[in-house]
Image: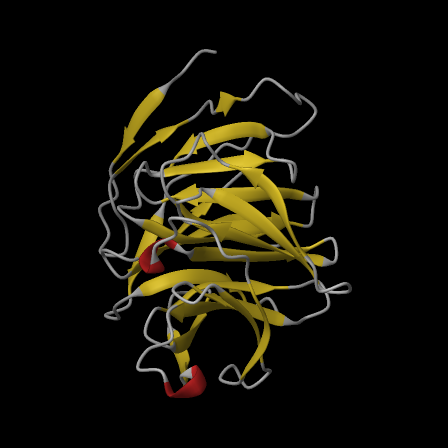
Amino acid sequence: MFYRHCVLFLLTVSSLSACLRDDPVNGGESPEYKAYTMGTPSSFETKLEGLSAICLNETGDGLLVAEDNGHIYEFGLDGSLRNSYTVPNPDGRTKVDLEGIALSADGKLFVCEERYREVYQLGADHKTLTLLSTGPTEPNAEDNQGYEGIAAGNGVLYIANQSKPKRVYTYSLSTKEWATAFDAEWATSLSDIYFDKEDGTLWITDAKTQKLTHLKTDGTVLYTYDISFVKKPEGFCKDAAGKKFWFVCDQTSRLTSVSYQ
């Protein structure tokens, strides 16, 4: 595969320099799936800390961002902060570590808690948690390397475990059963997962390698994209109507958008 690299200099306050790969790495399995070309990224300073996950809101005109100290923030698509919500700590815990947030096709919101490996439904008020299930116990698991991302599609929730193991689970919303979808041995550190309802595929970010991987729900890799314009990509979602990818960076506290074709 032929690779082209270009350096993009953004001169406005809300933009950043980046090097994008125009031609993504093709997994070689399914050429019928589309390869995307990304444009020039723009970023927005939030002045917040611990931002860890992102999804479109229920009406599609804004973004919901989860924070790892129990807060949900709502932003406009222009990067402006609209609202903030405090999620109560379950069982009187000192901290609820929200690392993933997802919106289902029927408008329900779901979040995952990393350290206790729990999945919750988030209320319409954006601050009420209803426990759905605690995930499988894994040998050698570490508290701070648990559930980093959640996605909703096909009647199931897809939950990305950061490492030990680097695994994607499914949780059936109908049968309430857990299963292993696949192990992501090609990754270094799973940081978010997104279900793409346009083609029924998944997207996974790797915060350590700054990669965005497009893959089938069985784990077959389709394409891998360089997203080094985000220093620590903890969250990802796709705005199909606006033709933009959105990222949240835990290290810089910035939201970044990039158009795609």
Q: Quadrant of residue 219?
A: top right
Pick whichever, 92 or 127, lies toward us: 92
Name the residue rendered at 25%, 68% in the picture: 49
Position above or below: 187 against 196: above
Q: As displayed, is residue 145 above or below residue 47?
A: above
State the image coordinates of residue 72 (x, y, percent, origin top left). Answer: 42, 76
Q: In the rendered view, does 3 fall on the left or right side of 243? A: left
Residue 87 visible, this orientation: no
Name the residue: 26% across, 43% down.
10
* On-image quarter of the C terminus: top right
Q: Is residue 194 in view? A: yes
Q: Position of residue 259 (x, y in %)?
A: 47, 44
Residue 147 image position (x, y, % from top left): 45, 57
**Relative vertical location of residue 2 with respect to residue 32 in this rendering, above or below:** above
Q: Which of these two is toward me, 169 or 48?
A: 169
User: Number of labelled discs?
Assistant: 0
Q: Is residue 66 left or right of residue 62?
A: left
Q: Is residue 39 left or right of residue 111?
A: left
Q: Residue 24, relative to residue 62: is it above or below?
A: above
Q: Residue at x 74, y 58 (%)?
A: 155
| Residue occupying the point 56% across, 63% down | 102
Task: Quadrant for residue 107, please give it.
Answer: bottom right
